[in-house]
Amino acid sequence: MTRFFHDQFAKQYLEELLSTIGEVKAPREVRGETRQIDVWFSPRSQLQGNLEALGLLGRFATIPALFEPFRNPATPDEIINCMLKLWEVRGELQREAKRKQTQLRSADYPKLWILTPTASQTILSGFGAISDEQNWLPGIYFMADYLRTAIVVIHQLPCTPETLWLRILGRGRVQSTAIDELEALPADNLFRSNALLLLADLLSNIEVNQNLESEDRELIMRLSPLFSQRLEEATKQGMQQGMQQGIREERREQIENILKVRFGTIDNQLEAIIEPSLSLLPAELVPLLLQLSRDELLARFVGQNGTQN
């Protein structure tokens, strides 16, 4: 059950990050035997800034792509099933191009990125997947060009800012370290808040599960203090805002009562006095409300032309 929650987190997380630079469908059904692509992505060229902010994930997203994230190491059968989805999408594109009588370029075909925490050398060799460290980072293994498939071994990626958004999908210490780096990012970072919210959802889901793996218990221990602190800060901020709002409403009511006693009713002109008068302290405001005439109050707080002072 916890694996399901991690899978859901991975899909939502990738969708959240990639939606800033293109169109995301998660999941997307393909024909043939019913299969679902975890994340289908189509880039938008005008958002290059966001693309760079995503680091290595942004490099993956420069072309149409299928993302298949795995919580546990992907097995050969699971990798083959992912590749079947790619071929079915390729077939759909060819049929659509034939109907529209258009020509497909190689760049129009999506690339499959299989995201797995670890992968044995036996599996990598079995698929003929080899690294290309001259052009890419360690941990990325490409199959033959026409297969348009790469296996990304998250735990082999270097621990750099460029790989952060992918290492969040790792396990154990790799994921914990990435969470530390995520927390340390500036508060105004484009993706930080949304990633933390999704991690909070993951935490709440796995906390209620009775059959936790040791790594899930460690993840709970890592995330709980973080979100307890954020909840406490949010609660304090909410209480302060609530108190300030309560005081403001109480003062507004006091001003309205004084105006009603003095002038009987509050018309549109007198209503315009209330908001600007809230900026004064009660000791200064109350004598003005009691002593000044209607015209003097309007001149003092609204102005002769009806604009607030």
Image: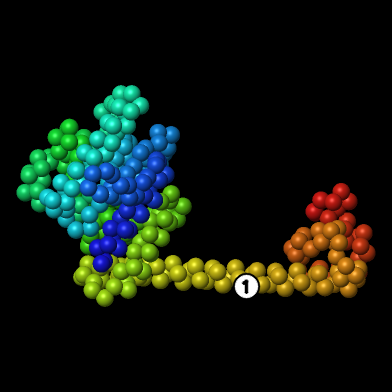
Q: Position of residue 213 (x, y in %)?
A: 21, 70
Residue at image position (43%, 34%) is 46
Indicate the secondary structure of the residue bearing disc 1.
helix
Q: Position of residue 283 (x, y in %)?
A: 79, 72
Q: Nearer the viewer, residue 84 or 211?
A: 84
Residue at image position (28%, 36%) is 92
Q: Nearer the viewer, residue 50 or 236?
A: 50
Q: Position of residue 238 (x, y in %)?
A: 55, 69
As drawn, is 98 to the left or to the right of 241?
left
Q: Quadrant of the N terminus?
A: bottom left
Q: How many marks?
A: 1
Q: Is residue 105 above or below residue 68?
A: above
Q: Farthest bottom residue?
A: 210
User: In which quarter of the view is residue 23 placed?
Assistant: top left
Q: Nearer the viewer, residue 262 or 89?
A: 89
- What amino acid type is highlighted by mark number 1? Met
User: In which quarter of the view is residue 170 placed?
Assistant: bottom left
As drawn, is 125 to the left or to the right of 47?
left
Residue at image position (49%, 67%) is 234
Q: How is the image coloured?
A: rainbow
Q: Position of residue 85 (x, y in %)?
A: 23, 44
Q: Is residue 272 above or below residue 108?
A: below
For residue 8, say whether it is visible. Answer: yes
Q: Quadrant of the C terminus?
A: bottom right
User: In which quarter of the view is residue 83 placed?
Assistant: top left
Residue at image position (78%, 73%) is 254
Q: Callout 1: 10 Å neighbours few (<14), some, many (20+)?
A: few
For residue 161, say whether it is visible. Answer: no
Mark 1 = which residue? 243
